Image (cartoon, rainbow, N blue to C red):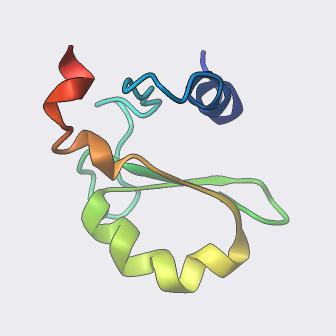
């Protein structure tokens, strides 16, 4: 399993590479509505994970982001540029 830190390091290690590593898959579902998750939030204090679809990620971001230690936003996977497929 690839962690967020490993994926970030892989991309950061080669800034000329257009490829981006996405961690969330179709198995990851929104805790609010059950749609595919594109946001994974790690909460401060408990380090529990919350998953959100792009809609609910945007809806809850303003309130939850100050309470989180990490906000993984993979909404770029929704309509990735063609370079991601090369
Ligand atoms: Zn949702």
Q: Residue at x 48, y 76 (%)?
A: 61
Residue appearing at x 47%, y 30% in the figure: 23
Question: Which quadrant of the figure has residue 20?
Answer: top left
Residue that lies at the very extreme toward the right in this rendered image: 45
**Can you say whether 27 is above or below 41 in the image?**
above
From the top left corner, tell me how far across and down residue 36 is, in percent: 27, 44
Residue at (67% x, 28% y) in the render: 9
Ligand 1's quadrant? bottom left
> Residue 80, image x and y in percent?
21, 38
**Residue 18 screen position, x and y as percent:** 37, 27
Quadrant containing the N terminus in the rendered view: top right
The x and y percentages for residue 14 are 58, 22
78 or 34: which is nearer to us? 78
Residue nearest the viewer, comparing 25 with 16: 16
Q: Nearer the viewer, residue 50 or 74?
A: 74
The quarter of the rendered structure image containing the C terminus is top left
């Amino acid at each position: 399993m690839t962690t967020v830190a490993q994926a970030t390091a892989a991309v950061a290690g080669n800034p000329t590479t257009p490829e981006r590593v996405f961690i969330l898959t179709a198995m990851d579902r929104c805790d609010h509505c059950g749609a595919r998750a594109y946001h994974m939030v790690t909460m401060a204090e408990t380090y529990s994970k919350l998953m959100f679809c792009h809609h609910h990620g945007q809806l809850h971001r303003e309130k939850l982001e100050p309470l989180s230690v990490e906000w993984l936003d993979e909404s770029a996977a929704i309509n990735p540029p063609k370079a991601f497929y090369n």
